[in-house]
Image: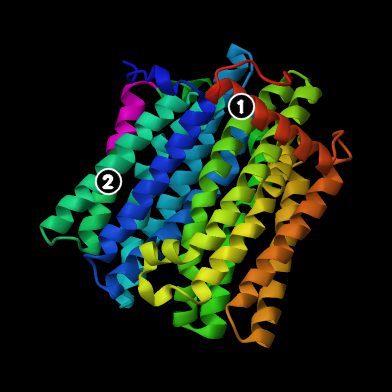
Amino acid sequence: MPFPKLSSLNNKHILALTGNFVIAGFSILTIALLAHNMGKPEMGIYFFFFLTYNLADAIRNGLLTTATVKFYAGAPAERATAVLGSVWYLALGLTLAMVLLNLLAIPFLPFTKNEEVIIVIQWFGATVLSSLPFNVTFWILVADEDYLTILWLRLVNSGSTIGVFGILALLHKATVFNILCANFATNTLTSVICMAFGYSKFITLFKRTKAVTRELFTFGKFSLSSTVSSYFLSAANGFIVNGMLGAPALAIFTIPNRLMEIIEIPLRSFVGTGMSAMATAYNNNNMYHLTFVSKKYAGMLTLVFVPVAIVTFFGADIAVWLLGGKQYTGGEASNILRVMMFIAILYPIDRFNGVTLDIINQPKINTYKVILMGIVNIVVAVVAIYFLKHVYGVVIATFCTTIAGIIFGYHHLRKHLNYTLSDILSLGLVELKNFYFEKVLKRPPVNPQ
């Protein structure tokens, strides 16, 4: 039984974007809801748990997300079934290994009084297991470009989560234990729906082959390295700021950094739709279309981010006040947000460079790219903060890191694809005009491709 259709939203870009807005919106509401109903110690435990869980999620997604899309999208039926079966086999094996590690840690519970560690040991394995079917389903639906189903599943998962959290808050029962119980229950609900409606394609597990499993793992281990490195890349600045400047500086850095996650919404949406299109083109040996998609999406987002950066420059204080309150406005947090948004104009080119390298079977190069960016980020952040004695040092590190990633990725892509940075911007401008004429004015594109 499929989810209901929304014909007015039947566009993969709109659906992907809407789905990511749903996730971001519910995430912001969740944090605001919990922050108003839980004390700082409990919020710290909550954030620590999900910092740990997100690392496990990054490992699982890193190994199999890109691999699923690359080898499944556009593949013949028999090959596609073997790929999905092998994906399930690897996902199950990796998840059960994490659960086993968790079980091995349980006997050590009496020897620690650290509440964060206790919560992680108690809930890590169950949470990782509860989200497995939903994760695998998401990878499959991205490859199928079925963004309407993704949207409905996200509404089920995030909507039920915030609903239960809201009830707990109203009953004054929003403890860490209850929140994690609710999170486990809503994850399980979504996973059961994925299995019951056949979206997870779990039955393909019995069609997996050793050869395909080995092929997926060989490819995935490189994207795993880049994904986990990317996770540490995003988390490193927080650890550095906290270690060198203390918790107040970390709070100043975290508020604008959380707001910058809004930029990830269109970025993730375009990467998701672009990745499946590029994978299909590559599997059909259509390198022209692969290059076209890479340039098109990177160029469109780059140009769209320019006015967003300008608006953010003038509205930074309002945005910071809405999330963090007046104690953060008119100072460092607002200035960090302004500068970071202008740096974000460069993010689409860097992100699509990395995705394209993965799709054209160069995951090792993409891994080197992420490692290089991590090294640049850590070194520049430490040096800049040491000399400036200020959180602004992280902004300098972010700019240097982004430039290093673009240069490295662009240099290696030019060995395989025929395009330039000017091609990206010019094609992006043409496609934005076409989008405006077709979707807004309902007229033929000005320059059909």
Residue 302 badge? none
In the image, residue 196 lies in the stretch drawn in magenta? yes
- Depth check: give the residue in front, 303 or 275: 303
Give x and y (percent) for residue 344: 63, 55
Q: Secondary structure at mark 1?
A: helix
User: Residue placed at 46% from the left, 33% from the top?
Assistant: 138
Amino acid type at circle 2 is Thr
User: Residue placed at 64% from the left, 33% from the top?
Assistant: 275
> Where is 252 relative to 78, above or below?
below
Separation of marks 2 and 1 at Cα, in angstroms: 35 Å
- The quadrant the C terminus occupies is top right
Give x and y (percent) for residue 220: 64, 41
- The quadrant the N terminus occupies is top left
- Depth check: give the residue in front, 422 or 407: 422
Q: How many marks?
A: 2
In the image, residue 275 lies in the stretch drawn in magenta? no
Q: Which residues are magenta?
A: 189-198
Q: Secondary structure at mark 2?
A: helix
> Where is 398 relative to 126, above or below?
below
What residue did someone put label 1 on?
435
Amino acid type at circle 1 is Phe
> Where is 119 relative to 311, above or below?
below
Give x and y (percent) for residue 389: 61, 87
